[in-house]
Image: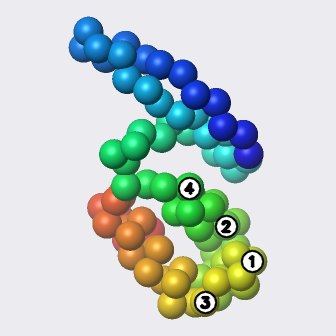
Amino acid sequence: MAWHTGTAASGGSRTRHAFLYFPCYGPTMIRADDPFDTYLLRVLCILIAEQSVSRTAIRLNQSQPAISAALKRLRTIFNDPL
């Protein structure tokens, strides 16, 4: 996982963005006002790989309720039952 920063022109103004190269997805653009943070990216990546909230919790050294709460946030962000 590596961070790269840069600027992008948007509507005549320049906006600062960070690009996260995540192993399971490739480059992902993150903005400061984006509710989708790196923790949620990690949870989503491992949830997809494990297909289990309990196994994801073990791999991230988190409790199962913490991963369930993150999954609830992901469901809200994507407006999808995942």
Q: Residues within 10 Å of mark 2 (few under 14, many from 20)?
A: some
Find disc 2 in the rendering and name its residue: 46
Work out whether mark 4 precedes mark 3 in sequence or the reverse, and give the earlier one: 4
Classify mark 1: helix, strand or loop.
Answer: helix
Labels 1 and 3 touching (C-beta < 8 A): no
Classify mark 4: helix, strand or loop.
Answer: helix
**Which of the numbered marks, if any, corresponds to residue 59?**
1
Estimate the x, y position of residue 8 in percent, counting from the top left: 43, 17
Q: Residues within 10 Å of mark 3 (few under 14, many from 20)?
A: few
Question: Which colouring convention does the figure follow?
Answer: rainbow
In the image, residue 10 sits, relative to residue 20, either above or below, namely: above
Q: Is residue 74 left or right of residue 49?
A: left
Give how far apart the Cα atoms at labels 4 and 1 are: 16 Å
Estimate the x, y position of residue 2 in percent, counting from the top left: 72, 40
In the image, residue 53 sits, relative to residue 6, either above or below, namely: below
Q: Residues within 10 Å of mark 1 (few under 14, many from 20)?
A: few
Labels 4 and 1 touching (C-beta < 8 A): no
Work out whether mark 2 precedes mark 3 in sequence or the reverse, and give the earlier one: 2
Q: Residue at x 46, y 74 (%)?
A: 71
**Which of the numbered marks, if any, corresponds to residue 38?**
4
- Pick the quarter of the image with the C terminus: bottom left
Estimate the x, y position of residue 63 in percent, counting from the top left: 60, 89
Estimate the x, y position of residue 59 in percent, counting from the top left: 75, 77
Type of the residue with mark 2:
Ile
Labels 4 and 2 touching (C-beta < 8 A): no
Q: Is residue 37 left or right of residue 43?
A: left
Q: Residues within 10 Å of mark 4 (few under 14, many from 20)?
A: few
Q: Residue at x 62, y 61 (%)?
A: 42
Q: Nearer the viewer, mark 4 or mark 2?
A: 4
Work out whether mark 4 precedes mark 2 in sequence or the reverse, and give the earlier one: 4
